[in-house]
Amino acid sequence: MKNFRKTRDELTNRLFQMFNKDIFNNFFHPDFSITWNGRLTRTAGYCRHFTKRENGIITFESRIELSVKVVDTPCRLRDTLIHELCHAATWIIDNCRGGHGPVWRKWANQALHTFPELPPITRCHNYEISYKFYYNCVSCKYSIGRHSKSIDTSTHVCPVCRGQLQLSKEPSSRVNENAEVKPKDKTPRTPNAFALFVKDNYAAIKSSRTDLPHAAVMKLLSAKFAESKLKLV
Ligand SMILES: [Zn+2]
Ligand SMILES: [Zn+2]
């Protein structure tokens, strides 16, 4: 899609102006920051939230980043931009983070109401990123995509079930790549993995550090959990 690369800035601008006017009542500043990021590979887009304080007045601001690698067609650009603008509205207009909760949903519904011909606005950008390499778990079929052979299968295991990983040119199942998309998927990653981690480690920490209150133990556990995740992938 060489052509798309040439026109994507102009198209982004046109789509932004249209969405801003028709969905968000021109709430966003015309210079609202939307940039392309060549390193973003795990998601199509990203909305960064921050606050600015000037003369004691706090303003809520956001910035959107789009993935050069994933957003490579006009349709993906349109859908990703709407999704991320809904995040920005959630923060700037409603001053609420809330992920894909009811406030974000409200804006997504507003967008669909204005443009009923659009495909459903989903919680996640469920695009298949074409990776060169896949590391497939031999037991649970979970796939990890990589643009290079960056995982050492002799030391790294499946983040879901700790099974053995196998290098391949194809993911073991296209469905598994988008695990977050389906709420009833059997492999929700972080929450369950963390709950298990807490279950396995809470008693040990609590008994060795009887001085610590529950909140401090949990804080310690989440730090240890983050550490253990780093080793895995
Ligand atoms: Zn989102
Ligand atoms: Zn596995």
Image: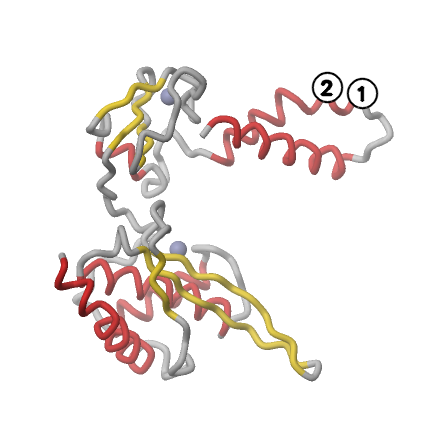
Q: Residue at x 33, y 37 (%)?
A: 179
Q: How many marks?
A: 2
Ligand 2 is within 8 Å of the C-beta of the residue at disc 1: no
| Residue with the mark numbered 2 | 204
Position above or below: 43 against 63: above
Q: Locate ligand 2 by image quadrant.
A: top left
Above or below residue 27? Residue 69 is above
Looking at the rendering, which quadrant does residue 13 occupy? bottom left
Q: Which residue is mark 1?
A: 208
Residue 186 point in image, percent of width and height: 37, 29
What x and y, as percent, mark residue 52? Answer: 60, 74
Does residue 73 appear left or right of residue 84 in this picture? left
Spot occupied by residue 48 in the image (x, y as percentages of width and height): 48, 61
* Amino acid found under the numbered disc labelled 2: Ala
Residue 59, by quadrant, is: bottom right
User: Height in image: 176 above or below 68?
Assistant: above
Q: Quadrant of the C terminus?
A: top left
Q: CA distance from mark 2 to mark 1?
A: 6 Å
| Badge 1 density bin: few <14, some 14–19, many ≥20, Cα 10 Å | few
Give the amino acid type for the residue marked by disc 1 in the picture. Ser
Q: Is residue 165 left or right of residue 116?
A: right
Give the image location of residue 133, x and y in percent: 26, 31
* Residue in view at x 33 percent, y 70 percent: 110
Identify which residue, 209 or 120, lies in the foreground.
209
Local SS, label 2: helix
Badge 2 vs badge 1, beta-carbon distance below 8 Å: yes
Tell me: is circle 2 under 8 Å from ligand 2. Answer: no
Dot 1 falls on a residue whose secondary structure is helix
Q: In the depicted view, which residue is nearer to us: 90 or 209?
A: 209
Query: Which quadrant is the N terminus positioned in?
Result: bottom left
